[in-house]
């Protein structure tokens, strides 16, 4: 397994819409393992393929608590088929926007349909942090970042800060 370099804001690749996965094969399963290893190393609880430079509709997550056994999950071509009217508020962060956190309001419960590594279509209901994480990562597949859900003023400040940091690194 290989730890992949993370793409960091303001990289325009983060705004790309990812392409559907056409088939489940061993190279894809190996890539899923690499993504999980990258996510755990970061450390994070979710990672979309675009965050490691692959514009594929694929995400991994593990919302188990530290004291619990790891529970890695892989979602291929995930789509939200239903959202609850009830809302929840969580402080979100992102491996592509390091050390920045903000409260984001999202539907409290979602039903997601996805292709598994077994090649089968699955559907499941997610709530709590699981629902929030799924929505955050599915947003990535559509070129949407969690900062798009906060005020324009805060978002502009974050983008300005990361753009300045990127300029300083490349200088």
Image: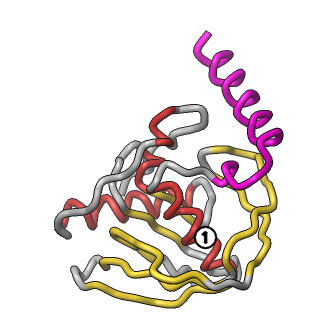
What type of secondary structure mainly makes up the magenta span?
helix
Q: Quadrant of residue 66?
A: bottom right
54 in relation to 63, above or below: above
Q: Residue at x 44, y 56 (%)?
A: 141
Residue reaching furthest to the front: 85
Nearest the eye: 43 or 116: 116
| Total numbered badges shown on the rendered structure | 1
Residue 82: image location, x then y, percent: 51, 83
Give the image's coloring scheme: secondary structure
Q: Residue at x 78, y 53 (%)?
A: 101
Quick one: SS at disc 1?
A: helix
Horizontal side, residue 119 vs residue 60: left or right:
left
**Residue position for label 1:** 133
- Give the magenta part as a residue range: 146-171
Q: Residue at x 52, y 70 (%)?
A: 61
Nearest the eye: 104 or 55: 104
Residue reaching furthest to the top: 171
Residue 8: image location, x then y, percent: 57, 38
Q: Does the magenta segment cover residue 126?
A: no
86 in relation to 29, above or below: below
Quadrant of the image containing the N terminus: bottom left
Residue 70: image location, x then y, percent: 55, 80
16 in relation to 84, above or below: above
Horizontal side, residue 150 vs residue 120: left or right:
right
Horizontal side, residue 67 vs residue 37: left or right:
right
Residue 54: image location, x then y, percent: 35, 47
Quadrant of the image containing the C terminus: top right
102 in relation to 63, above or below: above
Q: Does the magenta segment cover residue 166?
A: yes
């Amino acid at each position: 397994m290989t730890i992949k370099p993370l793409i960091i804001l303001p990289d325009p690749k983060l705004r790309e819409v990812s392409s559907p996965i056409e088939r489940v094969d061993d190279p894809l399963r190996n890539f899923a393992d690499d993504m999980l290893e990258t996510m755990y190393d970061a450390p994070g609880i979710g990672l979309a393929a675009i965050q490691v430079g692959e514009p594929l509709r694929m995400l991994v997550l593990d919302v188990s608590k530290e004291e619990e056994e790891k529970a890695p999950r892989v979602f291929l071509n995930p789509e939200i088929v239903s959202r609850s009217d009830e809302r929840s508020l969580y402080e979100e962060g992102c491996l592509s926007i390091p050390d920045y956190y903000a409260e984001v309001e999202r539907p409290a419960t979602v039903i997601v349909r996805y292709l598994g590594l077994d090649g089968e279509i699955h559907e499941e209901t997610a709530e709590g942090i699981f629902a929030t994480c799924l929505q955050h990562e599915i947003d990535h597949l559509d070129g949407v970042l969690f900062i798009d859900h906060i005020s324009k003023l805060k978002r502009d400040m974050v983008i300005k800060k990361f753009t300045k940091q990127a300029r300083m690194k490349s200088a």
